Image: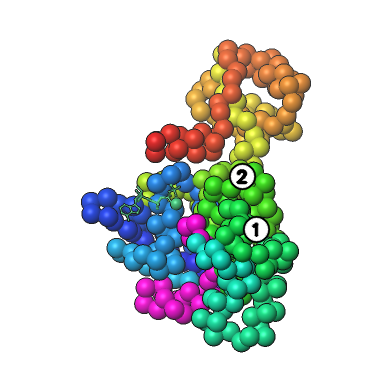
Amino acid sequence: MTQAIQIEGLTKTYGDFIAVDSLSLNISRNSFVGFLGPNGAGKSTTIKMLTNLTVATSGKAFLNGIDVVKDPKTALSEVGAVVETPEFYPYLTPDKSLEYIAKLRGMKKDDIVVRTKEVLDLVKMSHEHDMKIGKFSKGMKQRVAIAQALMFDPSIIILDEPTSGLDPRGMVEVREILLDLKKRDLTIFMSSHLLNEVQGLCDSVAMMNHGKLLLNKSIDDLKKELEYTRIQVDTIKHIDEAARSHLSENPCVGGVEVSAANQIIIEFKGGPEDRNDLLRRIDSELKVTSFFEHGNPLEEMYMGLIKESR
Ligand SMILES: Nc1ncnc2c1ncn2[C@@H]1O[C@H](COP(=O)(O)OP(=O)(O)OP(=O)(O)O)[C@@H](O)[C@H]1O
Ligand SMILES: [Mg+2]
């Protein structure tokens, strides 16, 4: 089966500057992928290439198997996108706004009425359907923009930082809508610079910085890594395979990596009592000289990534 989104060596340069550097990424149907990266990573540029708002310098992108550059109209016919803060005519209502774009697409009048109601319900804006958008908060406008993206029953939704610039309540409202959409037959590709947002919503995460893909894995795998603290233990006695496998039998211990003859990195999950118990066991077996938290590799990597880009 073809992928919903297929990106092959996609590159965008501005003069000498490489904004997106040979990016390759596959997104399978009905998955919800978070596209994570700090400011300037290249997320919006990638999304703009996918939605034909900007032309790639080289590389290819396919939506439902159709080449975006060669045949943008067909490729984007099943795509709903919210890229950049959407602008609406302030004197129009959500109803009129949706009617306007639907007429441009040649949708029949009766269908417009039915679909408008459906999508405004979906984004919890049915009460405000005939209020002027000019009076709406940023979060309300964002919800109308999502309604607009859903209007033509897309199979793929592409969102560029949908909660950016919203207050905490606005963020929660948009996230609730996204969780609703997740239950449907939809592929969602959403950029964000918030690790916790991506973790809470998505099935998998693609992380980029400086135009390059750094990581692409499922949230389940990511959670497994985040759930454990890594503890570095240095010992007097040598750590042999028997000692290593004995340690990994402890229910609070995930992986055990022997990083040197007298050093192990343990993935640990548990409370202070469990931690003390673990320390005493290793001490009695191997004689501990130091025992300290090694940090969380993923958080560290992401924070390092943000620091770098400042
Ligand atoms: N039209 C342009 N001309 C020149 N440089 C550009 C242009 N558009 C983007 N860039 C540069 O490309 C890089 C990637 O920008 P992009 O907007 O894709 O990042 P982003 O990951 O979306 O960041 P943010 O989180 O701030 O939205 C940035 O360094 C940006 O300055
Ligand atoms: Mg951006």
Identify whether 247 is placed above or below 145: above
> x and y percent of residue 79 in the render?
53, 71
Judge the density around disc 2: few (<14), some (14-19), many (≥20) Cα neighbours within 10 Å.
few
Identify whether 70 is placed above or below 212: below
> x and y percent of residue 226 in the render?
62, 38
Q: In the figure, residue 55 lies in which quadrant?
A: bottom left
SS under mark 2: loop
- Report the colour scheme: rainbow
Q: Earlier in the sequence, mark 1 or mark 2?
A: 2
Q: In the figure, residue 187 lies in which quadrant?
A: bottom right
Please tell me which residue lies in front, 129 or 291.
129
Residue under label 2, please give it: 167
> x and y percent of residue 297 in the render?
53, 35
Please tell me which residue lies in front, 216 or 68.
68
Q: Is residue 296 visible?
A: yes
Please tell me which residue lies in front, 122 or 263.
122
Q: What is the span of residues highlighted in magenta in the rendered image?
A: 64-86
